[in-house]
Amino acid sequence: MATKSPPPLMKKHSQTDLVSRLKTRKILGVGGEDDDGEVHRSKISQVLGNEIKFAVREPLGLRVWQFLSALMFTGIAVMALAFPEQLYEAVFDGRAVSSKTSTRLYGGALFSISLILWNSMYTVEKVIIRWTLLTEACYFSIQLIVTTVTVIESDVSSITAAVLVCGCLVFVAISGYFYYQVGRRPKKL
């Protein structure tokens, strides 16, 4: 019985064979772009996820705006909780409040929003930052509508109410600007 000897093994140098390397990377799913345009360098980065995807390229002044917003919400919330009559009288030019309960509930809601704003300062996740900015913009929009309607119904125009309305417009614009800037896709280099 004659047995054939196996053919000699040929060494394949995959480092020099470009086609072989590309085929291997394609089979492994490495090096190609995913739906977000991310190019994965290894299978491990695909499985574990890429943290850079969630990081935000922060617009200039975003953290300052977050700090000022949280500080302002906290300050007004404390005033509404501790001194409801004085806050109402300051905004609506000496008109007496009929019930302190509504102003204190307003203060409690503001305090809750301020806690969310304080916590958002410590995150780098784009989604959380955008949600807090949207919360601010919605709050200021509703504040603008409510204050305007109240001033029109009471036929009393005060400088404080006018400043509050103008302030709400500015705050809606700033929050909307940062919301848009954080949501933009970064430019490819």
Image: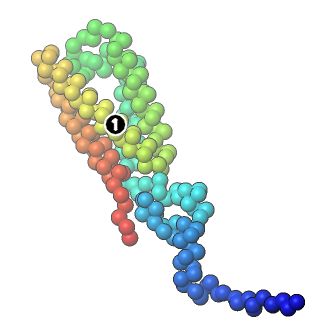
Identify which residue is drawn at 46% across, 38% down. 118
Residue 50 at x, y = what percent?
A: 53, 58
Identify which residue is drawn at 11% across, 17% down. 155
Local secondary structure at mark 1: helix
Residue at the far front: name it: 1
Q: Quadrant of the N terminus?
A: bottom right
Q: Nearer the viewer, residue 80 or 150?
A: 150
Q: Quadrant of residue 143?
A: top left
Residue at the far left: name it: 155
Residue 178 at x, y = what percent?
A: 32, 48
Residue 88 at x, y = what percent?
A: 28, 18
Identify which residue is drawn at 35% across, 51% down. 183
Residue 10 at x, y = what percent?
A: 70, 90
Q: How many marks?
A: 1
Identify which residue is drawn at 48% across, 68% down. 32
Q: Nearer the viewer, residue 67 or 134?
A: 134
Q: Is residue 118 above or below residue 29?
A: above
Q: Residues within 10 Å of mark 1 (few under 14, many from 20)?
A: many
From the image, tell me which residue sits under label 1: 136
Q: Quadrant of the C terminus?
A: bottom left
Q: Is residue 167 above or below residue 64?
A: above
Q: Is residue 10 above or below residue 73?
A: below
Q: Quadrant of residue 157?
A: top left
Please say whether residue 56 is visible from this viewpoint. Answer: yes
Query: On the rendered structure, is 62 left or right of 153?
Result: right
Please say whether residue 83 is visible from this viewpoint. Answer: no
Disc 1 marks a residue whose amino acid type is Glu
Q: How is the image coloured?
A: rainbow
